[in-house]
């Protein structure tokens, strides 16, 4: 489990990274941020980029900033930094959700931008970005552009980013004081079997583990109605009926956690 | 493709200049280029935590970092914990006293995990400690005694700090940081 | 429990003294096999078969050899090694011998089977070399499941075993058992209950993977092999035979070892190949198994299928037990235990802690196109205990009786007890441990307690004993051609009065450097820090059987004690001579000296004479202070026992399981070091819970592994494993030194049954009973939501 050879490039700026990605385009360059998924895949040789463009030394890419109604999170901000940040009631959903992200030593290195770029359908940042209509700010040769989360995630490891674009920032456009994310996995720190997030103010629900990308349900109805409408197939260890049940339960619990009136807890009467 | 990179690495306060292929992970560089074999390798995909070290004080998986990435960072390994004369640190003593290790293979990873965590969260509760201990795998102990060791170390440090701040005269009884609870 | 460093009753045994192993392990100064680096060392990686079942038509290593950094690459023909073959002394209808080649020659029998070894200047280049190999395979239909193996309509895994059955034994069949069962079926006064259970394939999963550093030493004309094995002499013998070397031309040493749990008590083909390559190249070779290899191509265990039925009287007395056991041993028979290890253990010991008057069992080992198996902590006992404890529960439920009362009615209470299986059980606290376990849970208020969050709670118990200290006699009954059992220990006192003791056992986490030192120190009356234990080196230790099957303290500890006592006699004789008194008025003074009449001679003074002034020795006494003794268990070994109690909460919303409480009442005789015993129990329970709730090695229909990483193979963490309350009972063993019994496996044995019973107790209102492990959360969810859906 040793990675295949690659050439290492340390980008000094976003522009530098973009230029490198363009110049090396023929030899499969990859951006290295936290590396918590990419390096594991490289060790398995499931990923074998010819070049790594390390952006972790680029100044100014880490940090959380309130900008009017919006919250702007730099791409290199770690999960741990978000977890520890005092985001106030408006965006506490983000720091609260970080407890679902792997374990402490993963959170200290893993980055928001890296997670978004990795596009795993159960990853917390992908779910939160989709739920809260976040905007991904990417820089390419032609400058910066904004991509709505709803159009960003195309499939596992596949996004709307161009090969020579680098994520610089994720923007959550409005406060979400009545939102929550909850998950179920057999074991602490695992990717969720099913994850559900809710924003009571918009009536949106996001689901992970039920499709190849986060599934957004606007104007969501009852948990049962949401679950019943899903097109699910049996998977090893997780038949469709089970995941449908998890959706019912987790949407109910997310709703309670987000502050909706009604019984909280883990009761049998959920959903 | 097998080009070599010059990397300046600071480990346990000591600076090393290395010429290594960029694909060498920090875990391999620590162990095999610097001879610091206390950092162990158990899975090479970031889950078991045997390779946990501190990077600028924060626990991180050395198997998921390339050494070339962490130039200029301060890296600490298990070899940094004991005193120069081999005297065990309080955390190491707690692991021994609580039987928090058996085969000892996972131990350096747990020690560095706890070291980094307690520095940031000195007031952690036992349940919070359990959640952090869940970051790494141990196959021998069943975890309870590891949690006990970290929890005990945290309380002793708090007691020692309190004792140092306490304006009570020296004659008053004080918690002895060397005794088991 | 003793405070660290303090003696209890003035003895070291029984005190939880600081571990001798700890300082180096805590400071990162232990020496594990991957910590060893030798000059000009090469790194090995293996080219592996990618199909589960295939003809191997060609291996082309030309590209591999051209990869920068690759120094050599060998296939089976290049190495020319003999096969590894494990045998049972059983007739052809009971046992079919098969061979495991070191590297595959013409057939691939599981996805991941080693085909060629690549040697390079660093492990990265070695893996580059592996990728450049061209292996041509002609796929055959894979045999992946028990059903496929036993239908056998395609090519068998081994041509020698056309029905894919390697072992088929019916060890016991009480006369008239059919009529007992038929009568029970027909009678309104009796019942017959059945349990069918399948247990998932598991990986013992030492956190340190397998590994080896080998080099040829021209001065000693020896192949020196540093490897993490539980049984070093076994590796020496197999390597010598495979490579055509004399035994003394192989030296196997074992550095610090990061766990074994049985996976490292058999001989692995990769360590043989790496050592052979080192000899061929006259350069040191290191191979460190990576985690993907460990999860897909190492030794696995535990995939078993039981169909058991038992007759009970109306008042809960067991009348007969009839069982069929099928163990999926994968592609190869492991050395030395053979594929018989699991079915033989299950067949021999299934009646467990109960008085079973009639017993019949058939045990089979089948071969499939999956990674092979080895003993894993508990070996079949976690499974048959689960079956027996489920039978007790089911009988109680059927008869409307209390399940603990049904157990009490059947527990062995008079000792020694000779069971229907021909095994004599030495005294234990079967009944007492159950009573205490129930009382602890009652005192803590668990029965009837329900959380207010909608979860449902259940309590489960498991009663069991485990045979520890399998001597030559017990293993001979299994009819292995290689019969482990005895242990030989040598003790030498140095000039300074300290002693060095060899043991054929081998600690890999069990703290022998501490516990053996305690045993020896008490007998000599010296500090346990004055005792050094030497283990894991075939050049320094007489042929030994390492550590497995909870044999170390019972057999190895007794051998060390016997050698120590002999040395004590020598010291007394010498003191008698020097003091001019009769030897029978001499005795060790318990403080590092010999009381000889009214004089006291410190050991240092005696050693001074023995080594530096030998002219003062009596005529018939040779110089030096050394003694050797062996120990074996003549009878059926000694049985540790325990009762586990487990409280679970099930979440109807998710099928999630949380263990709220776990209690273990254990009796391993006299505990040498109570904290070590507790550590073994806790760690064992964690592994048992893992098997019940989390871990399973799975394959797709083509035999491709689906669990190649820790993302899929779910080892539980501190968040899943509960704190465990441990209570000790002490029924000393009559024939081991110090009265100790083994303590290594019990935790693992009891936990699956306790967890499964607790879950089924929580499911009681649903009418659903689940008997397969690991428990699928989807099944739990379905059971809990049955009325709703």
Image (cartoon, helix red, strand yellow):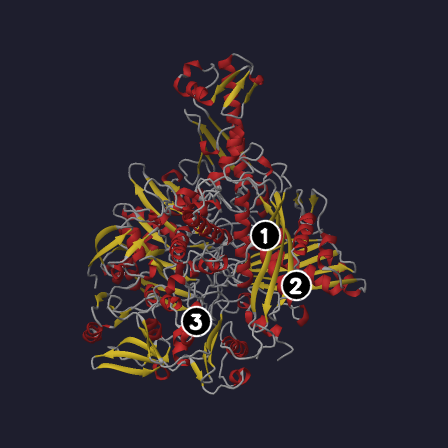
Mark pair 3, 2: CA separation: 32 Å
Give how far apart the Cα atoms at labels 2 and 1 are: 18 Å
Alpha carbon of mark 3 to alpha carbon of mark 1: how far? Answer: 33 Å
Q: Chain of mark 1?
A: C
Which residue is under mark 2?
Answer: C449
In the rendered image, is residue C619 in sight? yes
The residue at the point 71 percent across, 63 percent down is C193
**Looking at the rendered structure, which numbered label has been put on residue C725?**
1
Please identify, in this view, whether the residue under mark 3 or under mark 1 is nearer the observer. Answer: 3
Q: Secondary structure at mark 2?
A: loop
Q: Are marks 2 and 1 on the same chain?
A: yes
| Tag 3 residue | A97
In the image, C80 versus C226, the foreground residue is C226
Q: Are marks 3 and 1 in contact (CB under 8 Å)?
A: no
Badge 3 element: helix
Q: Residue at x 69, y 61 (%)?
A: C393
Report if the CB atoms under discs 3 and 2 are less than 8 Å apart: no
Does C153 appear above or below C717? below
The x and y percentages for residue B76 are 32, 53
Label 1 secondary element: strand
A112, above or below A108, in the image: below
Q: Quadrant of the N terminus of chain C?
A: top right
Mark seen at residue A218: none
């Amino acid at each position: 489990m040793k990675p295949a050879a690659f050439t290492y490039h340390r980008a000094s700026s976003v522009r530098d990274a973009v230029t490198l990605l363009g110049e090396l385009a023929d030899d499969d360059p990859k951006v290295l941020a936290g590396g918590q998924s990419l390096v594991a895949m490289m060790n398995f040789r499931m990923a074998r980029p010819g070049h790594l463009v390390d952006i972790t030394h680029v100044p100014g890419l880490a940090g959380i900033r309130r900008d009017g109604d919006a919250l702007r999170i730099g791409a290199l901000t770690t999960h741990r930094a978000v977890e520890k940040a005092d985001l106030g009631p408006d965006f506490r959903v983000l720091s609260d959700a970080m407890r679902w992200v792997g374990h402490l030593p993963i959170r200290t290195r893993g980055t928001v931008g890296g997670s978004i770029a990795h596009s795993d359908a159960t990853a917390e940042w992908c779910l939160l970005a989709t739920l809260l209509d976040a905007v991904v700010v990417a820089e390419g040769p032609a400058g910066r552009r904004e991509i709505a989360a709803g159009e960003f995630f195309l499939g596992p490891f596949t996004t709307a980013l161009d090969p020579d674009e680098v994520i610089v920032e994720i923007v959550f456009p409005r406060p979400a004081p009545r939102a929550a994310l909850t998950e179920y996995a057999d074991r602490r720190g695992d990717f969720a079997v099913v994850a559900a997030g809710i924003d009571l103010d918009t009536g949106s629900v996001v689901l992970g583990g039920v499709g190849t990308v986060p599934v957004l349900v606007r104007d969501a109805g009852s948990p049962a109605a949401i679950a019943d409408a899903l097109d699910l197939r049996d998977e090893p260890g997780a038949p469709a009926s089970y995941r449908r049940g998890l959706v019912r339960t987790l949407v109910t619990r997310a709703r309670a956690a987000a502050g909706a009136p009604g019984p909280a807890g883990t009761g049998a009467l959920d959903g | 493709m097998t080009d070599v990179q010059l990397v300046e690495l600071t480990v346990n306060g000591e600076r090393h200049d290395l010429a290594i292929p960029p694909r060498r992970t920090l875990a391999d560089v620590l162990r095999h280029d610097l001879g610091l074999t206390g950092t162990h390798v158990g899975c090479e995909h970031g889950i078991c935590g045997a390779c946990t070290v501190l990077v600028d004080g924060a626990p991180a998986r050395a198997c998921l970092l390339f050494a070339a990435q962490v130039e200029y960072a301060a890296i600490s390994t298990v070899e940094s914990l004991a005193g120069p004369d081999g005297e065990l640190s309080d955390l190491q003593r707690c692991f021994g006293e609580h039987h928090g290790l058996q085969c000892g293979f996972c131990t350096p990873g747990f020690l560095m995990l706890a070291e980094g965590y307690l520095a940031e969260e000195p007031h952690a509760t036992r349940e919070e400690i359990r959640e952090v201990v869940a970051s790494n795998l141990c196959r021998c102990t069943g975890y309870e005694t590891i949690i006990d060791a970290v929890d005990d170390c945290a309380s002793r440090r708090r007691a020692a700090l309190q004792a140092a701040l306490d304006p009570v005269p020296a004659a008053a009884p004080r918690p002895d940081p060397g005794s088991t609870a | 429990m003793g405070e660290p460093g303090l003696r209890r009753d003035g003895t070291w045994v029984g005190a939880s003294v600081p571990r001798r192993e700890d300082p180096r392990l805590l400071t990162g100064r232990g020496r594990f096999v991957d910590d060893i680096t030798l000059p000009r060392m090469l790194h090995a990686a293996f080219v592996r078969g990618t199909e589960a079942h295939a003809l191997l038509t060609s291996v082309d290593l030309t590209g591999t050899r051209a990869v920068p950094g690759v120094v050599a690459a060998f296939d089976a023909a290049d190495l020319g090694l003999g096969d590894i073959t494990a045998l049972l002394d059983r007739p052809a209808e009971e046992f079919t011998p098969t061979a495991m080649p070191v590297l595959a020659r013409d057939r691939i029998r599981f996805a991941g089977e080693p085909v060629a070894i690549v040697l390079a200047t660093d492990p990265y280049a070695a893996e580059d070399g592996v990728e450049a190999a061209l292996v041509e395979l002609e796929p055959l239909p894979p045999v992946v499941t028990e059903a496929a193996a036993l239908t056998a309509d395609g090519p068998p895994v081994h041509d020698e075993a056309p029905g894919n059955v390697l072992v088929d034994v019916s060890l016991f069949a009480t006369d008239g058992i059919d009529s007992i069962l038929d009568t029970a079926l027909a009678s309104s006064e009796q019942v017959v209950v059945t349990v069918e259970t399948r247990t998932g394939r598991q990986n013992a999963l030492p956190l340190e993977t397998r590994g080896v550093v080998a080099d040829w030493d021209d001065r000693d004309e020896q192949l020196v092999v540093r490897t993490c094995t539980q049984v070093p002499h076994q590796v020496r013998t197999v390597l010598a035979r495979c490579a055509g070397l004399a035994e003394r031309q192989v030296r196997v040493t074992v550095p610090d070892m990061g766990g074994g749990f049985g996976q490292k008590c058999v001989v692995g083909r990769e360590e043989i190949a790496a050592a052979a390559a080192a000899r061929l190249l006259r350069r040191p070779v290191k191979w460190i198994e990576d985690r993907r290899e460990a999860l897909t191509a190492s030794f696995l265990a535990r995939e078993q299928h039981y169909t058991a039925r038992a007759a009970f009287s109306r008042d809960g007395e067991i009348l007969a037990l009839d069982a069929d056991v099928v163990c999926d041993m994968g592609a190869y028979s492991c050395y030395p235990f053979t594929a018989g290890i699991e079915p033989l253990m299950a067949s021999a010991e299934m009646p467990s802690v109960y008085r079973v008057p009639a017993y019949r069992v058939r045990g089979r080992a089948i071969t499939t196109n999956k990674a092979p198996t080895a003993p894993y902590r508990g070996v079949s006992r976690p499974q048959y205990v689960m079956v027996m404890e489920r039978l007790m529960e089911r009988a109680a439920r059927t008869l409307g009786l209390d399940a603990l009362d049904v157990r009490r009615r059947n527990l062995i209470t008079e000792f020694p007890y000779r069971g229907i299986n021909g095994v004599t059980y030495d005294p234990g606290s079967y009944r007492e441990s159950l009573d205490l376990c129930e009382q602890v849970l009652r005192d803590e208020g668990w029965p009837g307690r329900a959380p207010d969050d909608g979860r449902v709670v259940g309590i489960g118990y498991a009663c069991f004993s485990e045979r520890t200290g399998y001597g030559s006699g017990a293993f001979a009954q299994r009819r292995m051609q290689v019969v482990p059992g005895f242990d030989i220990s040598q003790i030498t006192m140095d000039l300074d009065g300290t002693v060095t003791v060899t043991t054929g056992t081998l600690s890999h986490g069990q703290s022998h450097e501490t516990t053996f030192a305690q045993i020896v120190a008490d007998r000599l009356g010296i500090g346990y820090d004055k005792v050094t234990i030497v283990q894991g080196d075939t050049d320094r230790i007489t042929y030994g059987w390492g550590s497995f099957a909870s044999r170390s303290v019972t057999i190895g500890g007794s051998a060390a004690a016997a050698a120590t006592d002999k040395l004590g006699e020598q010291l007394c004789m010498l003191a008698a001579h020097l003091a001019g008194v009769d030897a029978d008025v001499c005795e060790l003074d318990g403080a590092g000296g010999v009381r000889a009449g009214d004089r006291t001679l410190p050991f240092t003074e005696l050693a001074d004479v023995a080594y530096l002034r030998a002219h003062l020795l009596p005529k018939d006494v040779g110089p030096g202070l050394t003694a050797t003794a062996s120990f074996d268990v003549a009878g059926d070994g000694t049985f540790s026992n325990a009762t586990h109690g487990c409280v679970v909460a099930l979440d109807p919303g998710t099928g999630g399981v949380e263990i709220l409480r776990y209690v273990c009442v254990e009796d391993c005789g006299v505990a040498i070091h109570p904290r070590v015993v507790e550590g073994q129990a806790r760690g064992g329970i964690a592994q048992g819970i893992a098997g019940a709730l989390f871990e399973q090695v799975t394959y797709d229909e083509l035999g491709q592994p689906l669990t190649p990483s820790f993302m899929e193979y779910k080892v539980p963490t501190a968040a899943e494993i509960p704190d465990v309350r441990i209570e000790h009972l002490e029924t000393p063993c009559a024939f081991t030194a110090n009265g100790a019994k083994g303590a290594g496996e019990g935790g693992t044995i009891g936990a699956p049954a306790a967890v499964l019973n607790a879950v089924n107790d929580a499911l009681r209102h649903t009418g659903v009973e689940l008997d397969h492990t690991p428990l699928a959360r989807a099944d739990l969810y379905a059971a809990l939501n049955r009325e709703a859906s």
